[in-house]
Amino acid sequence: MAMGGTMKLLMTGALLAASLALGGCSTQIADLPAVGLPADAPPRPKEVGGYLPVHDLPPERAEAAMKPDEQKRIQSELIAARDRQASSGTSPAPRSR
């Protein structure tokens, strides 16, 4: 008789644990009436938002980001700065990693 009572108690405990585990998956804590939302919380949207459009590419640019003559001018300025630094005789400080 004692074995049957123990088995019944274990089965009841397992059933209770399973129902609590499944019940925990179906509700949100913030929706419970005892907890609720803080007073300064923003209102929730009416519809749940969808996934972000990660595969949508931005539209092509109508014009280039930099005009070709401006790009050539900047490249020549950078080359001149590199040449001035190389001819100054000072070696740059070694980079540490």
Image (tube, rainbow, N blue to C red):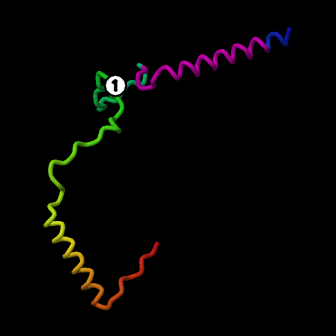
Residue situated in front as seen by the camera: 35 or 78: 78
SS class of the residue under badge 1?
loop
**In terms of secondary structure, what is the magenta stretch mainly?**
helix
Residue situated in front as seen by the camera: 30 or 69: 69
User: Where, by quadrant of the figure, is residue 69 drawn?
Assistant: bottom left
Residue at the extreme top: 1
Query: At label 1, which amino acid type do we have?
Result: Val
Q: Which residues are magenta?
A: 7-32
Magenta stretch contains residue 8: yes
User: Where, by quadrant of the figure, is residue 5 drawn?
Assistant: top right
Residue 13: x, y in percent? 69, 17
User: Disc count in the image?
Assistant: 1
Q: Residue at x 33, y 89 (%)?
A: 90
Residue 40: x, y in percent? 29, 32
Residue 46: x, y in percent? 29, 21
Q: Which residue is mark 1?
A: 48
Q: Residue at x 69, y 18 (%)?
A: 14
Residue 27: x, y in percent? 47, 21
Q: Residue at x 78, y 14 (%)?
A: 7
Quarter of the picture containing the N terminus is top right
Q: Is residue 73 above or below residue 1?
A: below
Q: Residues within 10 Å of mark 1 (few under 14, many from 20)?
A: few
20 horizontally vs 29: left or right: right
Magenta stretch contains residue 27: yes
Residue at the extreme bottom: 89
Residue situated in front as seen by the camera: 4 or 44: 44
Q: Residue at x 34, y 25 (%)?
A: 48
Residue situated in front as seen by the camera: 72 or 40: 72
Q: Is residue 96 above or below residue 87?
A: above
